[in-house]
Amino acid sequence: MKRKRGKIFVISSPSGGGKTSVCTRLKKTRFDIKYSVSATTRTPRKGEVNGRDYHFFLKARFKRLIKSGKFLEWADNFGDLYGTPKNFVLNNIKRSKDVILAIDVKGAMQVKKMYKKAVLTFLMPPSMDVLKKRLKKRKTEKGRGLARRLKVAKKELAYLKRYDYVVVNDSLVRAVETFKAIITAERNKVEK
């Protein structure tokens, strides 16, 4: 029996929590799901490719896209804008394709408000110490920037009760397998 609409799967975590790593692993094994590439105004990090890792935009263009309603959700994080291109998601779910969004808590709440059946999963670091080590290892933030991201991470934990699932990312392999199990369970759920 073919489903009428695809599902939106949201995976959120604090910066350094592993959502990009989980999605990268999922892409290698789950070809039956579409992965939304977020847009951002931040500068590309070393090795990032436009259109693969993010759609990189200048702030002026990003703001025009916001005004014209081209984003499903968007947020200002640490002075940079991030958003999910709306047409990609809507076109795929209309064609019965499931879509994964790797977005922050603010974006997840916007998506859930518009799409009540969106499935939200929070990827939790094993501890704040582990998160701090991961952020330091990335070498993208230092000093105040690192402290600011850790402060925001603590605030994001207050949203846990608004998520459908919480996965502790103490092992990337286990986190990916758990997320796969969530996808399978949600696909087999009886609609009421």
Image (spheres, rainbow, N blue to C red):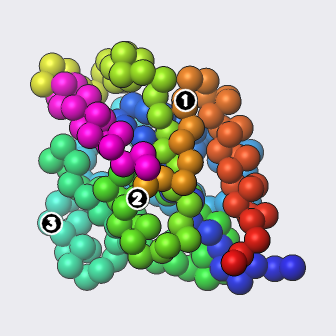
- 10 Å crowding of disc 3: few (<14), some (14-19), many (20+): few
Looking at the image, residue 166 lies above or below residue 86: above
Residue 16 is inside the magenta segment:
no
Label drawn at residue 60: 3
Residue type, label 1: Asn
Question: Where residue 117 sits: x, y (%)?
Answer: 56, 71
Q: Quadrant of residue 130?
A: top left
What is the spatial separation of the Cα atoms under label 2 and label 3, in whole angstroms?
24 Å
Main SS, magenta residues = helix
Who's the residue at 25% across and 82% down the image?
68
Who's the residue at 19% across and 21% down the image?
142
Q: Residue under label 1, please give it.
A: 169
Residue 151 is inside the magenta segment:
yes
Q: Residue under label 2, please give it.
A: 108
Looking at the image, residue 86 lies above or below residue 12: below
| Nearest to the observer: residue 167 or residue 25 | 167
Side of 40 relative to 88 (left or right): left
Residue type, label 2: Ala
Who's the residue at 81% across and 79% down the image?
2
Question: Where residue 78 sits: x, y (%)?
Answer: 18, 43
Looking at the image, residue 168 lies above or below residue 43: above
Residue type, label 3: Ala
Q: Which residues are magenta?
A: 145-161
Side of 92 relative to 177 (left or right): left
Whichever of labels 2 and 1 marks the residue nearer the N terminus, that label is: 2
